[in-house]
Image (spheres, coloured by chain):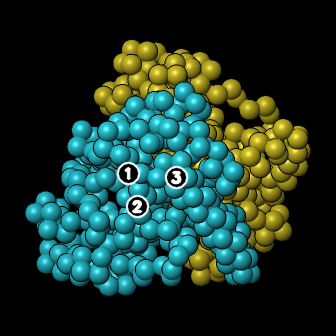
Chain colours: A cyan, B yellow
């Protein structure tokens, strides 16, 4: 099974190892996962985040999507599409799920961990009919099913329309938090560029060439500001350029502004 | 890993197979699991229901408990003690958990599936400190933890004393249901003997020699009465004497009485 690099390398590798499968990294560029590299890897399955790549924040380009569908058709491949923050786009309509392009090749995963709370532990898999019995069997072996009351409560929330209202309200709120991050960086560290879609709960900050990722993180920690490096998300940490993955989902606009202000000198280099 | 026969053969075998371990049955008699047979099996771990064996309903005798502790000490063995219906004894105080005899050898499992509802999917493992990190790692790989709101609600129920009140009320209720089963069998099929502790939600009915288990089950189904055979719970079904595992937990006293009355002629043979 292949996974995106940078990406969920530890999660995928641990799960694959437990299943007796080897996991191989495939590089991600500004158009998403490199499908030629995927093809060359020999993997028959791949875990992807096409709508908003974790952690680079890029979207899988239309051309790559077509290549990916061809890859899957050519090698009887399976794509595990993790649409982990599908509900949160701030500047435009969400891109369609890749699943729509190749429904017989894709297991699409969704979750309420981002839209409601990770504490609920609710998610779903939309997979080809042929895979469904195997997924059900595996789930039953692990836990004999998820809590029923939580599922019924979520269904009620959706059916009543209150889930949609919650999403609209939170989209506006998270959008303001992202704007606060953009504004704070422009004010305090204008040489730091920010990439990734206006979506989800994180953006990637590219540090000036002379600023070392780990040094900035350590110095910020001394000031009680938690920063996280892109290198942690890479299969080979030594190859990582100096980048930060900045989360803005669980912080107020005020906290974002004051946090960036207090580490501005570090980010400027 | 060894498992009790009769017992949870399918559950244990499937889980063991997934972990790359072979599962071996060990016979149960009226004193509980046969520890000499366990010792001879070469297994280094065993899944047991010592307080109220599933499905025979017997309790593991004091002598067998000592043998079991010796077995575990002698082979560095692990006992997985499934105390699945610990809260429900109708005629006496519950026997102590085996875990108390050999706390460094036992992983004791509890659940709210019987005391509240299987729909909650809440349980716990009390294990030796050395095993805890491995259990936590395995749990994290499977599901990254159980739903938090349900756990907090259960903690509130326990702390408030309402869980204890619920158990007292339900013990009385289930005790009456078991008494209804005993009375109905005495009235309609006096040759059928009932064994197993006055505990939990099931009892074992021993059919007269000339009555075939599967024939009774099929004929009862024609009359819309669901009966379950002991042979389904055995590793080798062909060796099973003619016995039924009668559940009384989710039926009213009236339903129990009328159900037994309507199949009394089948049980009498």
For the residue pair A63 and B28, the one nearer the viewer reads as A63
- Say if A90 sits above or below B12 in the image: below
User: In the shown orientation, is residue A265 left or right of residue A191?
Assistant: right
- Say if B123 sits above or below A91 in the image: above
- Distance Cα–Cα, label 3 vs label 1: 11 Å
Give the crowd class for mark 2: few <14, some 14-19, many >=20 residues within 10 Å. Answer: some
For the residue pair B261 and A38, the one nearer the viewer reads as A38
Q: Residue at x 35, y 78 (%)?
A: A98
Name the residue tied to disc 2. Answer: A195
For the residue pair B230 and B118, the one nearer the viewer reads as B118
Percent x, y for residue B5? 45, 44
Percent x, y for residue B57? 62, 43
Q: Do residues under tags 1 and 2 come within 8 Å of each other at their CB atoms?
A: yes
Residue B59 numbered mark, or none: none
- The answer to whether residue A167 shows anywhere in this view is yes
Query: Who comes first in sequence, dot 1 or dot 2?
Result: 2
Which corner quadrant holds the N terminus of chain B?
A: top left
Give the crowd class for mark 3: few <14, some 14-19, many >=20 residues within 10 Å. Answer: many
* SS at circle 2: strand
Percent x, y for residue B157? 82, 45
Instruction: Look at discs 2 and 3 and give the one toward the viewer.
Output: 3
Q: Do residues under tags 2 and 3 come within 8 Å of each other at their CB atoms?
A: no
Specify whether disc 3 shares its chain with disc 1: yes
Specify whether disc 1 shares its chain with disc 2: yes
Name the residue tied to disc 1. Answer: A206
* SS at circle 1: strand
- Distance Cα–Cα, label 2 vs label 3: 12 Å
């Amino acid at each position: 099974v292949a996974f995106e690099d940078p990406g969920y390398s530890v999660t995928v590798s641990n799960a694959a190892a437990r299943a007796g499968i080897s996991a191989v990294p495939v590089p991600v560029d500004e158009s998403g996962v490199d499908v030629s590299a995927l093809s060359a890897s020999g993997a028959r399955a791949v875990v992807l985040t096409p709508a908003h790549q974790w952690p680079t924040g890029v979207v899988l380009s239309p051309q790559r999507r077509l290549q990916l569908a061809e890859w899957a058709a050519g090698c009887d491949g399976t794509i595990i599409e993790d649409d982990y923050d599908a509900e949160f786009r701030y500047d435009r309509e969400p891109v369609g799920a890749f699943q729509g392009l190749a429904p017989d090749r894709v297991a699409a995963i969704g979750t309420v961990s981002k839209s409601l709370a990770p504490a609920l532990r609710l998610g779903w898999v939309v997979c080809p009919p042929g895979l469904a019995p195997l997924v059900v069997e595996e789930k039953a072996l692990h836990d004999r099913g998820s809590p029923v009351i939580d599922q019924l409560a979520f269904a009620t929330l959706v059916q009543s329309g209150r889930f949609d209202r919650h999403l609209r309200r939170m989209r506006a709120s998270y959008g303001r938090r992202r704007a606060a991050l953009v504004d704070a960086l422009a004010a305090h560290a204008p040489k730091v560029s920010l990439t990734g879609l206006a979506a989800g709960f994180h953006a990637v900050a590219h540090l000036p060439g002379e600023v070392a990722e780990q040094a900035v993180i350590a110095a910020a920690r001394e000031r009680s500001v938690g920063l996280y490096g892109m290198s942690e998300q890479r299969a080979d940490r030594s190859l990582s350029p100096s980048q930060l993955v900045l989360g803005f989902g669980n912080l107020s606009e005020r906290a974002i502004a004051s946090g960036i202000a207090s580490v501005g000198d570090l980010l400027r280099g």
